[in-house]
Amino acid sequence: MRYAFVALVLGALVYGGTRAWPAVESRLFKTEVRTGEVVVASPAQGATTVTATGYVVALTSARVSSRVPGRVAVVRVREGETVRAGQALLELDATDVRSTIAAARARVAAAEARVAIARANLADGRQQLERQRRLAESGAVSRQVVEDLQARLGPLEASVTAASAEVRALQADVNVQSAALSLLTIRAPFEGTIVNRPPRPGELLGSELMAGTVIELADFRSMVAEVDVPEGRLHLVRPGGPCEISLDAFPGRRFRGAVQELGHRVDRAKATVAVRVRFVEPMDGILPDMAARVGFLTQELTAEQLRAAQRTLVPAAAVTTRGGARVVLVVDNNAVHVRPVSLGPQAGDAYELIDGPAPGSRVVLHPPPTLGEAHPVREANR
C-alpha cells in the first residue's frame, strides 16, 4: 500500500512537471520565433514592386564656416530665413583688421610722398642739366659742370624707382589686409534656407576650441527622398519610374514621385543601394531628414488612389486568442508583449487593423500558447 502511494505521488510530480516545463522553459530561456511587421498598405499596393525606407535630403546644401577666427559682431539672418546667393549672413568683429588697414594705408601715403619728392628732385636735376648744357654750348661754363650734373641724374632716377617699388609693396600689404577684412563677412554661397540657429553676437568662431559649422544652408527646391533598396531587388527599380512617397510627418497623405538617380556603389554592411526619388509636385513643409517610405510602382498614381485612404495591415499568422480576446504578441527589446487588436476584413494573408500596434511594430508569427507577457524571445529572421 505504501509503495502504491509513493508511486502515485511520483507519477503526479512527473505529470505536473511535464505539463509545466514548457512554461518554465520559455521563462528561463529565449524562445526562437519568426516575426512579421504591421504595415501601412497603399491603394496602389498592387502596382508596387519594391518598398524602401529612408530620409528626405537636400541635394544642394552647405555647412558654412568661418575661414578666419573672430568674434561675432552682427548676425543678419535667423533660423528658417530664405537668403539669396551672396547675401551677408553674419559679420565678425573687424576693429583690429580695420586698424591694421588704416596703418598700412598711412605707410602707403608716406611712401607716395617720398616718391613725389624723388620725382621733384629728378625733375629739378634735369632742368639744371638742360640749363647748364645750353650755357656750355655758348662757352659760359665748362663741359665738366654738364658732366657732373649728368652723373647726378642716375641716383635721382634710382631713388624714384626705389620709392615707387616701396609704394607697390605697401599697397600689396593693404590689399592683403583688405582681403582679410572681406573674410570677416560670411556670405551665402547659394540661395537657400537657414536650417540651424545662427551664432549669437559675442560668440568666438574659427578657433580650434570653437571649430565647426557656423550656419547650415539648404536649398529646399532640391529636396529628394533618399532610400535604401535591397541589392537583390535593384533590378525592379528603373530611372524615371513612378513612385509613391509617404512621409511620417504627413500621416495619411501620399505624394507622386519619380526615380531621379540610382546610387553608384553598394553598401556592403546592409547590402543596399541608395536611390534618390524626386517629388513630382512641389510641396510646402518638407524638411531635411524627415523619415520617408517609397513604393516603386509599375504605373503612375491616379487621382483616385491619391485621395483613397491607406490601410494598416497585420499578418493573419500573428493573430491569436488569449482569454477569449484576439491579440498579437509584439516584440520589443527581445521580449513579447500581449496587445489586443480590433480587426477589419481579411485581405489575403493579412487582416485590416482597426486598432492595435502602430505601423512598424514587429509581431510574432504563429505564436505558441506557452508564449506570454514579457517572455524573452530571439527573432529567427533578424
Image (cartoon, rainbow, N blue to C red):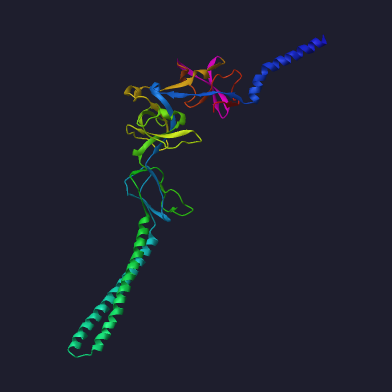
Residue 242 rendering spot, x and y as whole percentages? 35, 28
Q: Quadrant of residue 33?
A: top right
Quarter placement of the N terminus: top right
Task: Tally the numbered discs.
Answer: 0
Q: Is residue 241 magenta?
A: no
Relative to residue 349, is residue 257 drawn left or right?
Answer: left
> Would you place residue 142 above or below residue 174 in this image?
below
Residue farthest to the top, as pictured: 1
Q: Residue at x 27, y 80 (%)?
A: 153
Residue 122 rendering spot, x and y as whole percentages? 26, 78
Residue farthest to the right, as pictured: 2
Q: Residue at x 40, y 62 (%)?
A: 96
Q: Quadrant of residue 235?
A: top left
Q: Is residue 341 magenta?
A: yes
> Magenta residues, as a range?
324-346
Quarter placement of the C terminus: top right
Q: Quadrant of residue 97?
A: bottom left
Residue 115 rendering spot, x and y as whole percentages? 29, 73
Nearest the viewer among 202 and 335 is: 335
Nearest the viewer among 288 and 275 is: 275
Residue farthest to the left, as pictured: 138
Nearest the viewer among 128 and 302 is: 128
Residue 306 rendering spot, x and y as whole percentages? 35, 24
Relative to residue 204, is residue 382 drawn left or right?
Answer: right
